[in-house]
Image (spheres, rainbow, N blue to C red):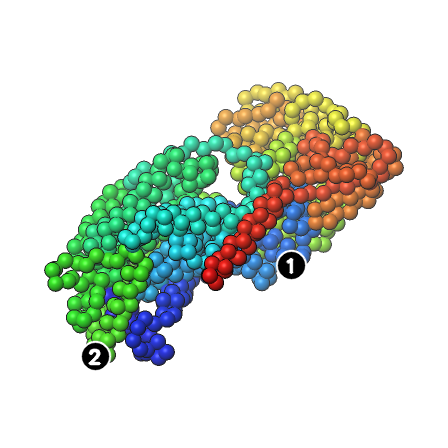
Amino acid sequence: MPPVAETVLDEVEAEGGEDAGPGPRTGAPARRGARAAGAAALLTAVLFCLATALSRSHPFGPVTRNVVDLGQQYLPYHAYWRSFLRGETHGDAFLNWNSGFGANFLGDVGTYLSSPVDLLVVFFPADRIELALYVVTAVKITAAGAAMAALLLRLRPGPWPVAAALGTAYALSGWTFNFGSTVPMWLDGLAAFPLLCLVGEWARTGRRPVLGPLVVALAWIANFYTAYMATLGAAVVLAVRLLTAEETATVRRHLAGALRAARSVLVGVGLAAPLVAVVFLGTKTADPTPEVTFAPAAWTDVLARFLPATASTASPALFIGTPALLLALTLPFNRAVAPRVRAALTAAVVLVTLSLQWEPTHLLWHAGASPNGVPYRQAFVLCGLLLIAAWFSVAGGVPRPAALLAGGALLGGLAWAARGSVDIDRWTFPASGAAVLLALIAALLALAAARREPSGAVGGNHRDSTGTAPEAPTGDNRENSTATARQDSARTALKAPARPARLLPLLAVLLLVAAQAGEAAVTGKRIEEQQRAEVAWSPRTGPWHEAAAREVARADAWPRHRTDPGEVPGGNDVLLVGGQGADHYSSLTSETTSRTLVSLGFGAYAKGRHPVTLDNPVTDALFSVGTRMRSEPAEPVRQDAPPRATVTATTVPVPPLVTVRPSARPAGPSGDSAFARQERLLGASVYELPAPRRTGRALAAHCPAGSEVWFWAPEYRGTATLAGQRPVRFDGKPPAVSAAMGALGTVPASGEVRIALDPEGRARLPREPVGCLVRARLDTAVDRLTATGATRVRTTGHTVTAALPPGSTGVAVLAVPRISGWSCAAGDADLRPARAYEGLVAVPLDGRADTVHCSFRPPGLRLGGAVGAAALLALAATGVLHRRRSRG
């Protein structure tokens, strides 16, 4: 953009006022940065909402946005977060009583909810939680655009409208639409990258030694996973800046800047340690997912992802807008940019691109573990680097025709090489072609405006008397002085009538913005439509969820017994509607929780990290589920309408939350089936376990008349039908999905049990797939555990206190999975790490104590607190030393 453009688009400064007069204008760079950030924020918000509206998605249309984990994890967690912040939950910051029969909530906060933006949910009503999450998502994306625009102007002076357009391009990259907008916690890393680059700039120039670590801490608290990637990316940018600093800079100055940056990162991460340590140790005890071997994407697909309207989880999302990409590709050929800057930035972009495809660097980006699902989560860093390259190429003026032609040739070659990719959409080339056309017209207008400038104006692409383009200054001082000279010359020129020259650059900027905006809107629209058609989705919240929430609130009797909301569409039911069920979908779901529940017949998704409810009277007795909700859908679940259902509540007698068993080792039938494990934990034989005869696709057995037939086959996928009853569906798909135990019907008077199997593929059955539950035996067991169990149970946010019958011996069992962090004591004894009883929390009894007390503290909290305190002292010392040096 020629220097006259910046003056035209900055009317206040152009017209004079407080900044009028000779010499540099104090505060002008800050005002331009604020304007760029504000314009980027506004444009980003408008375009993100426009893309949502074009795809007819909620809240601007009837169709659900809740694809994959957005509906299964983030929506329920934000609903619970709202309730927690308003004091409406039974748990506290340490423990979530609603999920997984008791889950580490601080770990989940650090994983999903610790961003300051997530606090916005408290201002929305409970029935508008989808709107709240959309606003949270939009605010994070908007903040990323504003931060990038401000960073660009800090790296090099230039026209603020162009910086705003490129900031918007970063915020609305393909990574944002394809990954970030459906995984809102990753969006904190998107905003963190430009902020951490600013921290690097402060460290390089010896400024803001206290604010820098605070920004690092905020980024790592908001989401340490993507903040780690953003920190690596900021280190790359800092290395480029140090390598391209002014010639007078010494190695000692470079080293000092790098050390200051390292100090900021170390202190900032230390300040975040109380939360980061909890999350880190939580991942160590989480249910492990199968190991993933990284397989690089085909380069054809990688190149295709630079283009608009492409979507895939198997390749990196790199779209930043064709005009911005074209500008980035002109950098190696733009002689108006210093050779060292061109070489360093080009090398950084190329090396980071290659690092996406090489396994050792892939593991480095992902902290040593190849992730399940999206393997290119760090791609937002490359998007940011590309936009920094684009800015350096255009900040001093529109690249000359030779550079534009060379960049256009690279862009054409990229598109040609990507033409055969499966990721190319029918909108890809039309959208890209239209954007290129608008960008070229904008470039021609800007070049025409540059030619019409008075000879006294200093332009980024003007040639000197020898006919060669002057090399752009490489140091901050030179850049700032040159920029000031350009602006002063342009102001002088503008005092003469030059309306056409003033309108041409304005029109050029508008065309550039239109090209970027159109592509972004089309890309967002198409990606949302493709995701809804190709991946799992959850319906919008509505009458079904509201009816379940009302019934749960009416029946809730915690801690006398649990209330399970049953199956509500979307998953993580208890976080949406309340209660204290088994449902829990988290990256930190404890291996103890997952394996204990699955071994007892519960189903699980997400490779074990999402155990789900089980409507079984034995497990209800084991976990003190006294009230259970059952839903009858009124219609099929659809994408374009909230579901409706009739919800009913059933309450039955169950043992208390704390029961007493005669010994530390459970007695009961031997065997590894879920039926045998339930009986051992219950301490009574309540099933008849026949040895079924298998003939082809049928099972035959004999059970007591009137008993209930249960079928258990966690790897089975298909239907099972008891003679005379309706088919029951089972969805086992190892290792991702374990099918839950299911009831098939009642044994007829003859006692003959015949089960017809209709498997999808090979029928994988355990040795004891059938159990016949005798209700009278179960009632007797429940009465015994109730009579010997706790007479009173009291809970607080993360503690349980139970009064026991005098003289109780054996072991007290708390119906909570024994995850890391539980400590218990009998009577007045000191708390010690809790023992386990078939996977549940246990406390030995000697007959002298008539109370037990258990408390939960998230692992890593004490260690993280110590590190955080040390980091706080280091930050205070840094501030004191900096103030003394400043005074000196």
Quarter holding residue 52 = bottom left
The disc labelled 2 sits on which kind of residue? Ala
Q: Residue furthest right?
A: 806
Q: For the residue labelled by badge 2, is the local secondary structure a helix, a strand or a loop?
A: loop
Looking at the image, tell me whether mark 1 or mark 2 is earlier in sequence order: 1
Count neighbours of disc 2 (C-alpha within 10 A) and say few if under 14, some if 14 to 19, many if 20 or more: few
Residue pictured at 67% horizontal, 57% vertical: 87
Left/right of residue 691 with respect to residue 506 in the rendered view: right
**Residue underneath mark 1:** 86
Query: Which label sits in the foreground, 1 or 2?
Result: 2
When the figure is inspected, residue 365 is found, relative to residue 553, above or below; the finding is above
The disc labelled 1 sits on which kind of residue? Arg
Q: Is residue 887 visible?
A: yes
Q: Nearer the viewer, residue 42 or 870?
A: 870
Left/right of residue 588 with respect to residue 814 in the rendered view: left
**Residue underneath mark 2:** 496
Quarter holding residue 750 = top right
Left/right of residue 504 with respect to residue 543 in the rendered view: left
Q: Nearer the viewer, residue 247 or 580?
A: 247
Residue pictured at 61% horizontal, 46% vertical: 865
Residue pictured at 47% horizontal, 48% vertical: 263
Left/right of residue 737 with respect to residue 419 in the rendered view: right
